[in-house]
Image (spheres, helix red, strand yellow):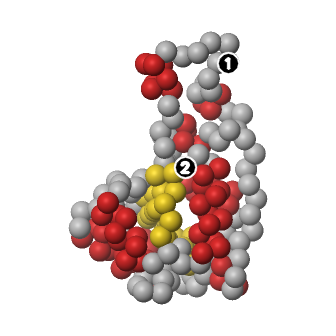
Amino acid sequence: MNSNNNMLTRLPLPSTDEACNSNRPNPQRLPNAKESRAATAPVLRVLLLEDNVELAELLRLVFEMWGFQPTVAHLGHEASRLLGEQEFRLALVDIDLPDTTGFEVVAGALAQGWLQNTKIIFFSGKPSDDRVAMARQFPGSVFVPKPFEMQTLLGLIQQLFPNDTVLFCYY
C-alpha cells in the first residue's frame, strides 16, 4: 500500500450496552415466528467505493464483523451500476478513483434520484480545504482524511445514525 492508504486498525470489543443485550436471544426459550421477526436487527447496507483492493477488503471484513452488509466497488462505473440496482443507507466513497472521482459518482447518483436516504462519507489521502468544502456540498455527507482509525470511523457512523443503536451491537 502506498502512504495514502495506510490505516491504523483498532477493532472494538463486543458491546455490553443494554440496548444490545435486550436484542440477544434468551437461550432458555425459543422465540415464536412473530418475536423472531421483531427481534431481527436492522441491517446497515453499505457501499464501499475504494480502488485500493487491500483497503477495500479490510473495510469489508471489519464492516461484516460489525454486523453491517457491505458491497464493494473498485471503480466509479461499478459503484454507479450498484447504486442503480440497490439502496444503501451509507456510502464510503474514495474521492480519487482511476476512472472518475467519488464526487462525480455521487453527483451522478443524486441526479438519477438515488442516494436520497443515504449518508455519505468521502475519504481521501490527499485532504485539502477545497475537498472538505466540496464534500460538504452533498446532503448528509462528511469528509474523513486517510489514514483513519477504524474505531473513529465507527464513532462517526454512530453519529450519522443516532437513532439506530441496534445497528451497533456486534456479537
Q: Tell me residue 49's x, y (percent).
A: 49, 70
Q: Is residue 44 above or below residue 111?
A: above
Of callouts 1 and 2, the N-terminal one = 1
Q: CA distance from mark 1 to mark 2?
A: 24 Å
| Residue 132 can be seen in this image | no
Q: Quadrant of the N terminus?
A: bottom right
Task: State whether residue 164 is above or below residue 18.
Answer: below
Question: Where in the figure is residue 170, as x and y percent of width and height?
Answer: 65, 41
Taking the spot 41% from the left edge, 85% from the top edge, the residue there is: 100
Q: What is the crowding at mark 1: few (fewer than 14 residues within 10 Å), some, or many (at least 20)?
A: few
> Mark 2: which amino acid?
Phe
What residue would you read off at disc 2? 68
> In the shown orientation, is residue 1 left or right of residue 127?
right
Q: Residue furthest top?
A: 29
* Residue depth check, mark 1 versus mark 2: number of the one nearer the observer: 1
Image quadrant of residue 25? top right
Residue at 62%, 12% (x, y): give it. Answer: 29
Q: Which mark is residue 27?
A: 1
State which quarter of the image contains the C terminus.
Answer: top right
Residue at left 34%, top 69%? 81
Does dot 1 land on a helix, a strand or a loop? loop
Q: Say if residue 168 shows up in the picture.
A: yes
**Dot 1 amino acid type:** Pro
Q: Nearer the viewer, residue 30 or 139?
A: 30
